[in-house]
Image: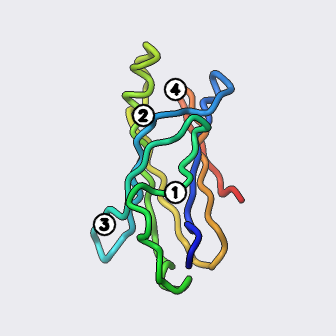
Amino acid sequence: MNKNPITTHILNTSLGKPAADINIQLFVLKGQEWLLLSSAVTNEDGRIDDWLDNGWYQDKQPEDLFSTYKIVFELDAYWLKQGIDAFYPSAEICFKVQDIKHHHVPLLLSPYSYSTYRGS
């Protein structure tokens, strides 16, 4: 598989803008433990184009990627830069990859709430 099968982006819904410079980690569940696959920082468009430790998915068949994943968004530093003492210092989104389709996991963010959905 040559294209990153899991992508994300963050939108600050309180400002109506992408959320840049947020640290994100991608984990996979192996047995009872979460294994860190990669880390990245959102760009000016609030997106992760490719994970910094890119290549974790290279040379794998799509079926080899079927598992449970977790994306951890470190939000505290982002809000503090804006002078906001937000309610959620981080957000964790767990999801399953059970097919060979692309999995886009957006985060819609405000100081006191967040939501997500399976994007395309």
| Residue receiving disc 4 | 112
Camera-near label (1 vs 4) is: 1
Asked which quadrant contains residue 63, the reply is: bottom right
Q: Residues within 10 Å of mark 3 (few under 14, many from 20)?
A: some
| Residue receiving disc 3 | 35
Measure how far apart labels 2 and 4 are at the Cα level.
11 Å
Q: Looking at the rendering, in which quadrant would you find the N terminus?
A: bottom right
| Residue receiving disc 1 | 50
Residue occupying image coordinates x 55% and y 66%: 4
Task: Give whichever of 10, 58 is nearer the camera.
Answer: 58
Camera-near label (2 vs 4) is: 2
Measure how far apart labels 3 and 4 are at the Cα level.
29 Å
Cβ atoms at labels 1 and 2 below 8 Å apart: no
Label 4 element class? loop
Measure how far apart labels 3 and 2 are at the Cα level.
21 Å
**Mark closer to the chain start, 1 or 2:** 1
Camera-near label (3 vs 1) is: 1
**Mark closer to the chain start, 1 or 4:** 1
Q: Residues within 10 Å of mark 4 (few under 14, many from 20)?
A: few
Residue farthest to the right, as pictured: 120
Task: Give whichever of 47, 14 is nearer the camera.
Answer: 47
Q: Looking at the rendering, in which quadrant would you find the C terminus?
A: bottom right
**Mark closer to the chain start, 3 or 1:** 3
Q: Is residue 40 left or right of residue 66?
A: left
Q: Is residue 38 left or right of residue 18?
A: left
| Residue receiving disc 2 | 75
Measure how far apart labels 1 and 2 are at the Cα level.
20 Å
**Residue 59, percent from left and from top:** 47, 83
Measure how far apart labels 1 and 4 are at the Cα level.
28 Å
